[in-house]
Image (cartoon, rainbow, N blue to C red):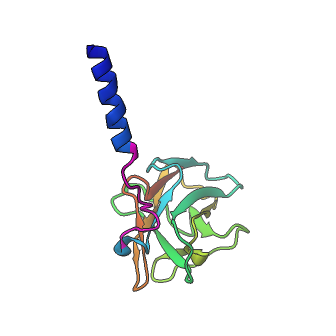
Amino acid sequence: MRTIVFISFLFITGLLLISCEKKDYLKEGLPEYSNHYYAAYLPNNNSVVTAQRNQTALLKLTVQFYSAYVRDYDAVAFYKVSTTGITNPAALGVDYAIVDKNGSVIQPVDGKYSIVFPQAKRATDTIYVKMLNNTTSGTRRVEVQLMDNLTDKYEVDTFSTAYNRPIDIK
């Protein structure tokens, strides 16, 4: 008898749960988040990357742009190189250069580089770093950091666990 009552209780509870109204929260999202995007490194961590100073292949840092919508504007994510607090910093233009996929040097604007995501679509892109074969001995470090970008139309935010990519140049 207890088994029948228990099974009946589970069955009725299950019916009540599946009969609840379901909402598509992606379509009915909060308006304040409908233009809020994220940029983060893949894999989603702040792990150190090691590069050889004499390597000829470009170092590739993959960036994921998280978006659920297609918009009529392009979203821009920013990044910068930083040596703040690093005891043996790598020097831009001496140890490494930020380049495009063809190896041509990219110049920052106000200390920031940009990645454009057309129509704010979910996508991946790549930051390229070229080693310049500096003969100075020892390991040198630089960090490539994704940055927030707040505009009147949208915000590109970062993950605290995947916004920084330290590069050790050996």
Residue 155: quarter of image? bottom left
Q: Residue furthest top?
A: 1
For residue 28: magenta?
Answer: yes
Q: Position of residue 113 (x, y in %)?
A: 52, 75
Q: Is residue 147 left or right of residue 13?
A: right
Against 111, residue 56 (above or below) is above
Report the residue at 60% width, 55% height from top: 135
The vertical placement of 18 against 118, above or below, is above
Q: Which residues are magenta?
A: 18-30
Main SS of the magenta part reads loop
Please identify the residue farthest to the left as the structure is shown: 2
Q: Is residue 95 left or right of residue 8?
A: right
Magenta stretch: includes residue 48:
no
Residue occupying image coordinates x 68% and y 52%: 55
Q: Position of residue 46 (x, y in %)?
A: 43, 50
Q: Is residue 170 visible?
A: no
How many numbered dots are placed on residues in this image? 0
Q: Is residue 87 left or right of residue 59?
A: left
Q: Residue at x 35, y 43 (%)?
A: 17
Residue 153 in view, yes or no? yes
The image quarter in which residue 35 lies = bottom left
Between 34 and 161, the one nearer to me in the picture: 34
Q: Residue 120's spot in the image, x, y percent?
A: 55, 74
Where 61 sits versus 105, above or below? above
Q: The N terminus appears in which quarter of the rendering?
A: top left
Question: Going by the picture, which residue comes out furthest to the bottom?
Answer: 152
* Residue 107: % across, % down: 57, 79
Look at 42% across and 68% down and name the residue there: 28
- Residue 24 sits above or below residue 7 on the image: below
Residue at the extreme front of the image, as rendered: 1
